[in-house]
Image (cartoon, helix red, strand yellow):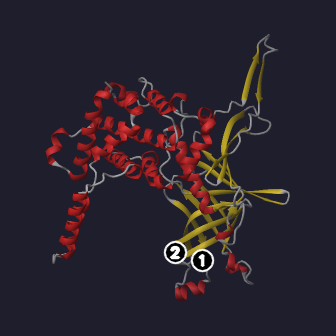
Amino acid sequence: MLGEAFECSGMWWLPQRANLPDESLEHRYGTLKYSPGGGIILTILGAFASADEIMATFDIPSNLDIVLGLSSKGERITLLNCSQDGVTIGDVVESRYRARTVLVGCQFTEPKKVAFEALDIQYTHLSEWARFNVFDISEAWGSKEQQDRTIKYKQPEQVSPAAADKYAISVVPGVALRLAMFPSDTVTLEQTSSIRVTSPSSGHITLSECFSLVFKMQGFLTLMMLDGIFPTGVQGISHSKDSVHTVRLLYEPVGKQKPVSKLRPQDMPFDFQTIRANFGSLLDNFFKDSRMRSVYNQFFSDFYAPSTYTEEQFITMSTTVEAFHRRICQEDVKTTAESDAMGELAEWIDKMQAQGDLAAELRRRLLASYEMPLRKRLEQLLTKYGNPFIHAVLGEDNIDRFLDDVVAMRKYYLTYDENLAGDALKGYELFVLYSKLKLLCWALFLNKIGMSENEIEDALKAQTRDETSRFGFLRQSHG
């Protein structure tokens, strides 16, 4: 599974050297190992060059597009984008390569040939989010000899694929049966779900598209569940004649995955059954919004690689809300007189015989004069999109205080204005302010992809309803 440590031994070689007469110099035995945070490392005995070449010239390939392998279990393996990670020359030569991607189940001789007809992707919490009730459990109670329990699996209704960008995406239910051994007194039945992606237009999904799709879907699920969601398995599917080929993709996931625990239904703002009717339009809006992609990613970084410092989390959220405004709201239009004056000043700066650094500083200050203040950006966002956030989280009477706190704290942390040090929020108060900003960003993004204001407000109220809710502590500061 993605993000889990693994190790396998086998034989490794370069595709362009596989058919040379003396294969003893070209096929190397070694170990492929992955550890979270440590990357994917291939360690081989020898090198992908002869010993004489190494000793004479140290001409060892430093970057390899593809390395092929056959594991001791008979699995065909392809390593992509390998870079030299070190070499030890002694009685035995040992070489180490760092790989970006591992493909298990097929050997590709060229990177451009890596493509699939479909993808199956698993994510953390996906089964809870999909909410396919596939098990029917009944019990019959009678005498001790007549007690009976029956577990039935019922195939749920198939979900029509949703069109998102140029892909067809569907949520696929399933079930897993596990036996510890056979015969066994322990049987595990587990409901599973996956995301199936196909590309009707092109017919194939390239490797770069695979990574993009996995990451975009990860973001969408994180937005729906308001929790850090991570891919746990990616499988490419191809057909040839009467057979189906599956290839597992292994790579270093983005961010630090926390231990998986069950999400309570009340912790999940929008599960699949809730948004099923609008799933396609919401997903399509999210996938196609390339202009907002970097802003989404900045927001998700708080889930994927959260900081231990509340100050940094606050700065991330304040920057996110500012970046969102820059992309959807028009900047203030200067009057004709102001524009003319600015133009004349710019011409004067260009003509002045000043040092380069001074001229650059003057230009920077001139451009800064066009910048809209953060408070005005927040006011515009709250006026245009903020009703759900105001009604459910902030309260009408707290708008000015919220704006004052955000602007003051942003200025304090980014410029370290000592005049604000005495009133700067710290500890729990800063955490509350950061949490409100986080919910504001979330509400803005939901609005952007097509959620109605009523749906957003209901979701915000559910997240802040009482002490058992994830953001229930904000109720104490509401009103």
Q: Is residue 305 visible?
A: no
Residues at marks 1 and 2 touching, judged by CB atoms closer than 8 Å: yes
| Nearest the eye: 61 or 115 | 115
Which residue type carries mark 2? Val
Residue 192 in the figure: left or right of residue 476: right
Q: Quadrant of the C terminus?
A: top left
Q: As drawn, is 76 to the left or to the right of 79? A: right
Percent of width and height locating residue 408: 23, 43
Q: Which mark is residue 47?
A: 1
Q: Secondary structure at mark 2?
A: strand
Which tag, 1 or 2, sits closer to the chain's start?
A: 1
Estimate the x, y position of residue 150 in percent, counting from the top left.
78, 23
**Percent x, y of residue 15:** 68, 75
Report the residue that reaches farthest toward the bottom: 56
Residue 136 in view of the camera: yes
Q: Is residue 194 above or below residue 89?
A: above
Q: Is residue 369 left or right of residue 133?
A: left
- Quadrant of the image occupied by residue 158: top right
Identified at 55% across, 47% down, the residue is 285
- Crowd class of label 2 (few under 14; some 14 to 19; many from 20; radius 10 Å): some
- SS for dot 1: loop
Q: Viewer-proximal residue, 85 or 431?
A: 431
- Using the image, tell me which numbered label, if any, was put on residue 87: 2
Quarter occupied by residue 20: bottom right
